[in-house]
């Protein structure tokens, strides 16, 4: 399904158009690109669909979509049925959907030191920091149930802001095929793939200033697997979009994979 009549974001219009892909595109052996779009929910649907189309223009044919099941504690499929339909179409075309917390908002404060780290990681989005084991399991199970009711079977999980707790890791081990933190992809309770996610920070002026250069620099180092995170908020920052454009062009010979593909391999 293609979303029509979406106005282009200003910074996307300013980007140079990707070169047309050749009919047969050479791929570097054992060189892969795993792109994840974070924070997919009703209020960001148009932007996420626009970013997915932009990635397709760059030849990225497989993406992992991280869906917030109940932003503001309202089931996403009830608030935006077309989003649920789009997600089902995307998975049919080869994309993967993973659960991205439950509501993507912290409801309880953690211990002072852990709370300070959580604020740096995700500001008010570190929703599992401060929850006990029972509350954590309830949130994970509620989000998974809402995705299944929308016709989506998530195999993986990514915590908002990569803010994990021992209770959350324990809850995920028996419920999902994989879960990803900032440095690794975990499968069956063990670290299966070591590769840091390149992500652009938007929550503080320091992150906005520094992260585009860091992402460009780290992408040059490469490695067998390049993980790249995109957020709807990136569209508000031209330096972010230009950095992503540069990374995607440099990664043009890599094979695009989802996190589900990585676990299957």
Image (spheres, rainbow, N blue to C red):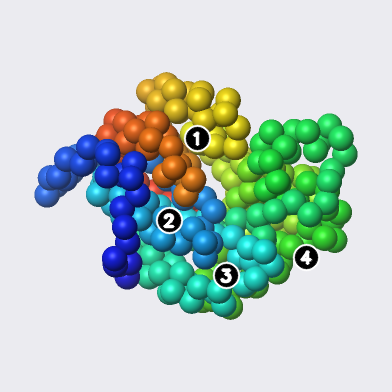
Q: Secondary structure at mark 2?
A: helix
Q: Helix, strand or loop at disc 3? A: helix
Element at label 4: helix
Nearest to the observer: residue 28 or residue 86: 86
Rounded to the nearest angstrom, the CA distance separating label 1 from label 4 is 30 Å
- The percent position of residue 263, horizontal first and vertical second, equals 51, 50
Badge 1 vs badge 2, beta-carbon distance below 8 Å: no
Q: Which residue is mark 2?
A: 48
Rendered residue at 71%/62% (across/down):
140
Say few, some or many: other residues with alpha carbon within 10 Å of mark 2 (under 14 / 14 to 19 / 20 or more). many
Indicate the quadrant containing the N terminus: top left, top right, bottom left or bottom right: bottom left
Instruction: Tell me which corner region of the image, top left, top right, bottom left or bottom right, holds residue 58.
Output: top left
Mark 4 touches mark 3? (CB < 8 Å) = no
**Which mark's residue is nearer the viewer, 1 or 4?**
1
In whole angstroms, how far apart are the C-alphas of marks 2 and 3?
A: 14 Å
Q: Mark 3 or mark 4, which is nearer the start of the sequence?
A: 3
Q: Which residue is mark 3?
A: 76
């Amino acid at each position: 399904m293609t979303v029509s009549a979406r106005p282009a974001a200003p910074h996307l219009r300013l980007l140079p158009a990707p070169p047309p892909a050749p009919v047969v595109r050479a791929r570097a052996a054992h060189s892969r690109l795993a792109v994840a779009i974070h924070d997919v929910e009703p209020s960001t649907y148009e932007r996420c669909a626009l970013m997915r189309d932009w990635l397709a223009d760059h030849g990225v044919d497989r993406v992992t979509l991280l869906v917030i099941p109940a932003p503001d504690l309202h089931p996403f499929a009830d608030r935006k049925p077309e989003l649920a339909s789009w997600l089902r179409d995307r998975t049919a075309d080869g994309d993967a959907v993973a659960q991205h917390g439950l509501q993507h908002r912290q409801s309880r404060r953690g211990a002072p030191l852990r709370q300070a780290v959580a604020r740096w990681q995700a500001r008010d989005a570190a929703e599992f920091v401060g929850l006990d084991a029972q509350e954590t399991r309830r949130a994970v199970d509620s989000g998974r149930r809402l995705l299944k009711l929308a016709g989506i079977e998530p195999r993986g999980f990514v915590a908002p802001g990569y803010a994990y707790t021992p209770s959350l890791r324990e809850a995920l081990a028996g419920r999902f095929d994989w879960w990803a933190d900032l440095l690794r992809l975990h499968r069956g309770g063990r670290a299966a793939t070591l590769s840091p996610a390149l992500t652009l920070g938007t929550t503080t002026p320091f992150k906005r200033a520094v992260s585009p250069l860091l992402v460009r620099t780290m992408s040059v180092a490469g490695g067998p697997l390049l993980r790249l995170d995109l957020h709807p908020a990136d569209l508000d920052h031209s330096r972010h979009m230009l950095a992503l454009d540069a990374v995607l062009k440099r990664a043009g010979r890599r094979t695009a994979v989802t996190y589900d593909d990585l676990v299957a391999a």
